[in-house]
Image (cartoon, rainbow, N blue to C red):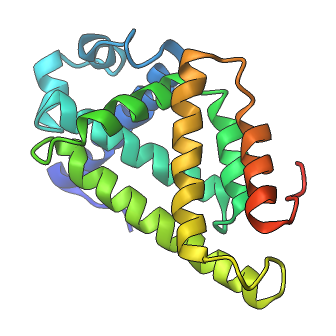
Amino acid sequence: MAKRGPYGKGIERREQILEAALHTIAERGFLATSVAELAEAVGLSQSGLLHYFGSKEELFVAVLRKRDEVDVAAMGEPSPEALIRLIRHNTQVPGLVELFTHMQAAAADADHPAHEYMRLHYELGTRGLAYVLRDMQQAGQIPATVDVEVMATAFMALSDGLQSRWLIDPSIDMEFYLRQCWAQFTGVHPRSG
């Protein structure tokens, strides 16, 4: 049942803002997109837009959360192959990669709004990937000698590091490096897709 009244309308308006921000940032880039442009895209003033989020930084963290929601729905079950598909998809939305990289650096400050988002993002992502890797290990798909916690942490860090490098040098083939590292770590080549 749909929410009614001002609260429901506020939630709906916030979702419209996030959808517009995802599209605009993906297309134009994080650094090339101002809050004023995002506000204009949804027919609000800059202060009207920020009313829904509290600050510019909290707006961008909300955009990342929305991006994660969309990516998780598209990715399905976490796995090394799903992470590789996600990295391939990210080459189509460089502005969102740029936003993530900027917020990742800002999150080093424990008082920044992105700090808790990034901490939780990595905790849940690593835990989910380790869980899937453990299942793969029990099914005999990866060697029993592989430490799945280490592998999940390293694989996520590698994917983020490659994305940062790709922003500087778009000729980097992130998918190639992820597949090669997966093969080196496990002795198993993930299928191409």
28 versus 167 height, above or below: above
Q: Position of residue 124 (x, y in %)?
A: 43, 67
Answer with the quarter of the image where residue 63 lies.
Answer: top left
Q: Position of residue 128 (x, y in %)?
A: 53, 72
Q: Is residue 40 left or right of residue 100?
A: left
65 versus 101 height, above or below: below
Pick the quarter of the image with the N terminus.
bottom left
Q: Residue at x 17, y 38 (%)?
A: 52
Asked whether 47 or 193 is in front, the reply is 193
130 versus 50 height, above or below: below
The count of marks equals 0
Q: Position of residue 151 (x, y in %)?
A: 60, 66
Q: Is residue 160 visible?
A: yes
Q: Residue at x 72, y 18 (%)?
A: 171
Q: Is residue 160 left or right of residue 33?
A: right
Q: Position of residue 86 (x, y in %)?
A: 66, 46
